[in-house]
Image (spheres, grey):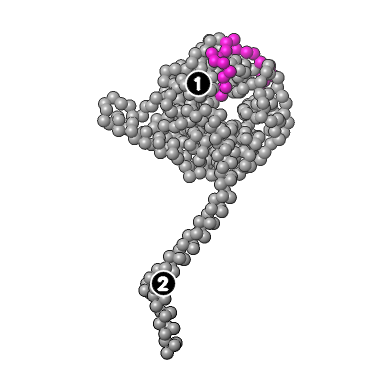
Amino acid sequence: MKCSRLARLLRIAWLLGATLVPGVDALAHDPNTYGGLFRSRDMGASWIGADVGLFLNGTLALAVDPRDSNHLLLGTDNGLFGSPSGGRSWMQEAPDRLNGAVFAVAFAPAGGTALCGTPAGLFRWTGGEWTAADAPSAAAPARAIAFGAASGRVYLLGPGGLFASDDDGARFDQLAAPASGLSELAVVRSPKEVVLLLAAGRLMASEDGGRHWQARPAPGALGAIALDPAHPARLWAAQGAGILRSDDLGQSWQRLPGVLPVAAPVVRGIAADAAAATFVVTGDRGLFRSVDGGQTWQLGEGGLPVRLESGPLARDPASAATLYAVFSLIPYAEAWRSAIEGKALLARADLLDLVGAGALVLALLLLGAGLVFGLLRLRSGRGPAADHQARAHEAAVLRR
């Protein structure tokens, strides 16, 4: 809440500056000062800010409504924000329920339903309202959410493993994890469903809804995976500063000729055009782009942050060339750790709140009783001195 108050104060300051000083843009901000959301409609050649009016420490995840490309849901370190206008205006979603960091948010393929995870649990949007989903505690906060091929099928990756739902996310049950160290989730829906996980850098695949898993070969540990919307069997993966390509969902791999111009990056997002000529990659060193099939890479500029971490890329389902990149002033690893610790604090606070509330109620009752008794004595004109005089008078009468 402190962050949102600060953001509002900063926005007011900019508005006042625009009013008093000609030429000041009230809605712009230095991209290196705050986290932000940026959109490109040309595979990363140019970017514009899509977070008008928001001043956030961390933007963590974005989802685009398949039925309406202007309807956006933005996960931040301070809750979930929605825009009905492609980022020209924003409103916080269910601030009384969706508190804390939101790392995962997703729309159903047909639209109409959305899911997001917070440290307090998983929430489901239907009929224009957010309600709590029935999910095990180990599912929160969600790291990734992906809808499956069958109607109503949803997969969720949380701190406690992999979870699945068959009713559009109303209820989740835990699946048997193929291994420990789960970090990435992707689901191929066509021509058949294949669930992909990264487990301690190893690629695991299931073709039967998570009941059985098979390790797929890779030349070393992988750091991130991304599906290609133009080719259902194509999978992109990061390995160190290099990018790998598989046209058979991880059965075999090819390495792009060049590497990112930074040492040991943590890659979080990979996007390629249909011809595999133009690439956009995001990670802890920012955003990079290649226009020659991955031979050379340039750091993203032109209004993009150059000193902030970038999170997963999001694509518009209606336009493969439209990308969204999120940037965070708070390191993502720190934000995730804070979310986990925040969940633990919430769990401990439940009992403490009950005990504290009971003690407060008891104290208030005792205080109220004391005040009522005192007021009654004042109204009767009898204080301690009056009581002493009355007792002395009664004793004198008895002696007579």
In-front residue for pair 197/340: 340
Relative to 143, residue 221 above or below: above
* SS class, disc 1: strand
Per the image, is 249 magenta? yes
Judge left or right: residue 224 versus residue 17: right
Q: Residue at x 42, y 24 (%)?
A: 31
Judge left or right: residue 393 versus residue 293: left
- Amino acid, disc 2: Pro
Mark in the foreground, 1 or 2: 2
Residue 107, can we see it? Answer: no
Q: Quadrant of the C terminus?
A: bottom left
Residue 145 x %, y %: 59, 33
Relative to 372, residue 166 above or below: above
* SS class, disc 2: helix
Per the image, is 260 magenta? yes
Residue 169 x %, y %: 59, 39
Q: Quadrant of the N terminus?
A: top left
| First in sequence: mark 1 vs mark 2 | 1
- Location of residue 212 by image quarter: top right
The span picked out in magenta is: 248-268
Residue 134, can we see it? Answer: yes
User: Local crowd at mark 2 within 10 Å, few (<14), some, or many (≥20)?
Assistant: few
Q: Residue at x 62, y 18 (%)?
A: 239
Judge left or right: residue 238 versus residue 280: right
Could you tell me what secondary structure mostly forms the magenta stretch?
Answer: loop
Task: Give the label on residue 24, or none.
Answer: none
According to the picture, the residue beneath numbered tag 2 turns out to be: 384
Relative to 233, residue 366 above or below: below
- Amino acid, disc 1: Gly
According to the picture, the residue beneath numbered tag 1 turns out to be: 286
